Amino acid sequence: MNTQTLPGNAPEALQQAVHVLQQGGIVALPTDTVYGIAAQLTNPDAIERLYEVKGREHTKAIAVLIGSAQQLGQVARDPSPAALRLAERFWPGALTLVVPRHLSLPANLSQTGTVGVRVPDHVLAQQLLLTCGPLAVTSANLSGQPDALSAQEVFAQLGGRIDAILNGGHTPGAVPSTVVDTTVSPPRILRTGPISESEILSIPADGQ
């Protein structure tokens, strides 16, 4: 497979990336943490390719990126008040919220009834997500290998395995997002990251 690199500053690059995704392809994109590889959320076969490209176990769920908090209802079923408050405070940003997944989402996205969702604080990623809708996204590296922080690092690991790389330059942060389970009360931090535990706990779970 010939992996195409699309310059993020080229006007036509975004539409090319959207076309690849709509055809069931895999596109690497920059985020505010590390580069990710994305597939159309409504395409189970494309999601399956994400597992194959990375060598990722199916027991490990694949997260969803959305372009704005307004898209949360497309991927989450009855998000809790705590989830909505955390989203309002920290999105866009390096916070992944574990929420009950929408019943319409493909089964191979996760082996549980939940899904991790976030809005990346990256203009190019947001433009792509707002154009084509929510995407299934996982980090752009082979399982067990270092995260990719640039298009060149993505190509070094995944060149020939994915269809395209949307080159947005070097990613600003090398630390994966903070992950919070909002399906329990109070919300529980599953992975520490750029947003600290004290910042999470500063948002009252009961809205008071």
Image (cartoon, rainbow, N blue to C red):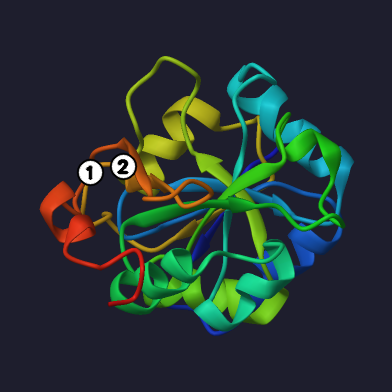
- Distance, label 1 to label 2, CA atoms, is 6 Å
- Depth check, mark 1 against mark 2: the one in front is 1
Q: Residue at x 27, y 55 (%)?
A: 171
Closer to us: 198 or 53 = 198
Residue 160 position within the rendered picture, expressed as x and y whole percent measured from the top left: 64, 31
Q: Residue at x 34, y 32 (%)?
A: 147
Assign a secondary structure to mark 1: loop
Residue 92 position within the rendered picture, expressed as x and y whole percent measured from the top left: 36, 73
Residue 83 position within the rendered picture, expressed as x and y whole percent measured from the top left: 46, 64
Q: State the quadrant of the N terminus.
A: top right
Q: Residue at x 61, y 20 (%)?
A: 56
122 relative to 164 in the view: left or right: left
Q: Residue 193: which disc? A: 1
Identify whether 116 is placed above or below 206. Answer: above
Identify whether 182 is placed above or below 139. Answer: below
Q: Residues within 10 Å of mark 1 (few under 14, many from 20)?
A: some
Q: Residues within 10 Å of mark 2 (few under 14, many from 20)?
A: some
- For label 2, the residue is 176
